[in-house]
Image: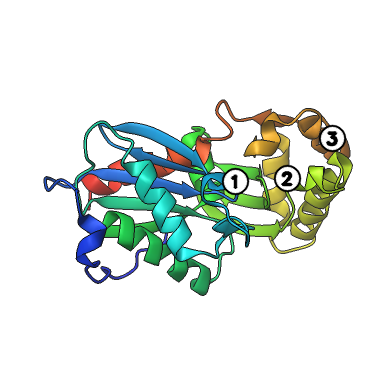
Amino acid sequence: MTVPTRPASPPPSASRNRAAGPLTALAVDLGSDTVGVWAAHHGTVNGSWNDASNSTGTPVRRGRVVDVDGCTSLLTRLVHRYPQPVPQGGVVVACRPVLASEADQETTRRVLDAVFAPERLVFIDTVRAAAVGSGAAAGRLLVVDIGAELTEVALLQDGRVRAARRTEIGTRDLTRGATVDLIGENVLRHIDDLRAGPDASALVTALARGILLVGDGAVHPGLATAVSGLLRVRVHRAAAPRTAALNGAGLAAMSLLRHP
């Protein structure tokens, strides 16, 4: 996780209609297709970026926030769906795609500052959060996260990313000419890259355990079978593959709140 310096105070409009109170733990996952927010004692709310799409497209594309105002607007409306207002200035843990750039992270921070005015904002790689949310973070683990527009492959050691690869392809591309086999071959290529690197021995141990498959691809018919067949290893679907990362980020937020 990356712990940035405390952000500057947001403009007054960011906290309008927000309730003051003790710090609360929040988790946010800004996917390329859906957005999810978890808040302690409030539960989870989910929405689709299609609700904020316009002639130029959706606010998040290929894992990057490309429309700060549109993203802020939808996220604000989503949070207001909670029956009780979420206290301002909480501890926020936000998922980010593995290998995200500093510029991408800074843009996401602008959105989260405007919506939540967090006391503390921490980023966690989506693959790491998914492992935590699936209860599988211990030891060496290979996580494959196939989302709507991104595929992330990461080798984890006790919950920390040891090596990773990513490609801008996902389940949404299946409606644009991509095939299940193409996505599976993309995963295989990333694993071959890791196998040729300095973490080859750790990868062997992780593969013996099997692959943890998360994201929208984990529920897509035939994709898990294709990946398993190409790699000749077991593929374990997370119990809640679409929300595993958000659940893990929520656990991280609760831990940070209890042990700052």
Q: Amino acid at mark 3?
A: Ala
Q: Amino acid at mark 1?
A: Asp
- Asked if marks 1 and 2 touch (Cβ < 8 Å), the reply is yes
Residue 141: x and y in percent read 61, 43
Distance between mark 1 and mark 2 Cα atoms: 9 Å
Secondary structure under tag 3 reads helix
Secondary structure under tag 1 reads loop
Residue in the picture at 34% in, 68% down = 4
Q: Which residue is mark 1?
A: 33
Q: Is residue 158 visible?
A: no
Please identify the residue farthest to the front as the structure is shown. 55
Task: Give the class, few, some or many, for how many residues have Cα within 10 Å of label 1's Cα (few <14, many ≥20).
Answer: many
Q: Report the mark closest to the observer, 3 or 1.
A: 1
Q: Which residue is mark 3?
A: 226
Sooner in the amino-acid sequence: mark 3 or mark 2: 2
| 135 relative to 160, above or below | above
Residue 159: x and y in percent read 50, 47
Sooner in the amino-acid sequence: mark 3 or mark 1: 1
Of residues 210 and 31, the one drawn nearer to the viewer in this rendering? 31
Residue 227: x and y in percent read 81, 38
Rendering quarter of residue 206: top right
Q: Report the mark closest to the observer, 3 or 2.
A: 2
Task: Give the class, few, some or many, for how many residues have Cα within 10 Å of label 2's Cα (few <14, many ≥20).
Answer: some
Task: Give the class, few, some or many, for how many residues have Cα within 10 Å of label 3's Cα (few <14, many ≥20).
Answer: some
Residue 105: x and y in percent read 47, 66
